[in-house]
Image (cartoon, rainbow, N blue to C red):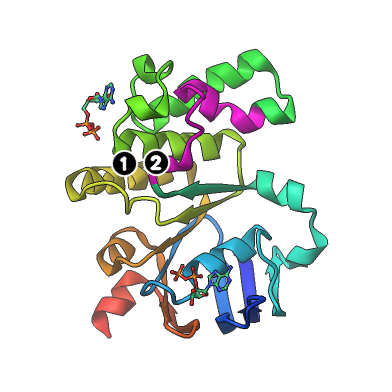
Amino acid sequence: DVVIEFESVTKRYRDGTTAVQDLSLTIPSDKITVIVGPSGCGKTTTLRMINRMLEPTSGSISWDGAPLKSKRKTQLRRQMGYVIQSGGLFPHRTVIENIQTVPTLIGWDKTKNRNRAYELLEMVGLERKLAQRYPSQLSGGQQQRVGVARALAADPIVMLMDEPFSAVDPVVRADLHEQFLQLQKKIGKTIVMITHDIDEAIKLGDQIAIMRKGGVLAQVGSPQQLLEE
Ligand code: ADP
Ligand code: ADP
């Protein structure tokens, strides 16, 4: 049940920088795959090629056996939730409005959207009374959780997470890690997360892909394999 497959993918930016070179990577479904490596090694570039925010220069990426290129970008963006550091929330929308962003755009039923948004708020461990607050009235950890709820609201098949926990302090981060693992037990999504924190990768990853500078993928394996070798 391989879901996303990179084959010899290279990404060169217009200025000539090769961010990713000859990368092959298999992302299984319904598991957390963590891509870990130092700053600048090509993690963000790799993540952004999965929802076609960026196109590979060469090589191919497939999803469920079909080339990503054959899929419409708007469709992909809905099927793939995207979470960034501290949530990336819209500052002028309340928590509940933030969560309903995509369902509202799609034009799903308003009452259902609202009920689902409150359900998601609870799923990510936030109290109902926070619903009418603005992002600036939340702690970093709370903003991050709203970001996860917003990404889940569109019912994505895949969740792409760009250093989602790096902006919160270590104590809050440990809590978020636990809650995130609990949440994943319930939802069982295909998750691709990038981080520069090896401890985080070991704690959260069912699969770990290690990148090193120059964009070469060194290894893919489970945390257990990693610790034994
Ligand atoms: P990471 O997420 O691991 O920090 P990135 O994928 O952001 O790595 O970057 C990989 C390499 O590509 C770095 O050398 C970075 O400077 C370069 N890079 C990233 N974005 C661009 C861009 N838009 N144009 C040119 N070079 C870029
Ligand atoms: P957490 O440990 O969940 O990250 P904090 O310790 O930062 O939260 O905040 C504690 C409480 O204070 C939370 O209930 C949060 O809603 C509230 N809070 C934090 N910042 C603000 C703010 N700028 N305006 C209103 N309430 C806030």
Q: Quick one: 176 or 181, which is closer to the camera?
A: 176
- Image disc number at residue 179: 1
Label 1 sits on a secondary structure element that is helix
Which SS does the magenta portion mostly show? Answer: helix
Residue 67 visible to the viewer: no
Name the image quarter holding residue 183.
top left
Location of residue 50 by image quarter: bottom right
- Reading the image, the residue beneath label 2 is 183
Placement of 86 over or under 108, stated as above or below: below
Q: Specify the label residue 16 is tagged with.
A: none
Counting other residues with Cα less than 10 Å from the Cα at mark 1, is it few (<14), some (14-19), or many (20 or more)? some
Secondary element at tag 2: helix
Q: Is 10 located above or below residue 152 in the figure?
A: below
- Which region shows up in magenta? 86-103
The picture quadrant where one finds residue 111 is top right
The quadrant where ligand 2 appears is: top left
Residue at the spot x=25%, y=48% of the render? 173
51 or 86, nearer to the observer? 86
Asked if residue 188 is positioned above or below residue 92 in the image, the reply reads: below
The amino acid type of the residue labelled 2 equals: Leu
| Image position of 194 (left or right of 201) | right
Horizontal and vertical percent position of residue 227? 25, 77
Count up the numbered dots.
2
Can you give x and y, in whole percent of width and height, for residue 89 in the image? 48, 36
Q: Quadrant of the N terminus?
A: bottom right
Q: Which quadrant is home to the C terminus?
A: bottom left
98 within the magenta span: yes
Residue type at numbered disc 1: Gln
- Please report the residue visible at 55 percent of the width from the left and 63 percent of the height from the top: 47
Q: Are marks 2 and 1 in contact (CB under 8 Å)?
A: yes
Give the alpha-carbon distance from disc 2 to disc 1, as whole Å.
6 Å
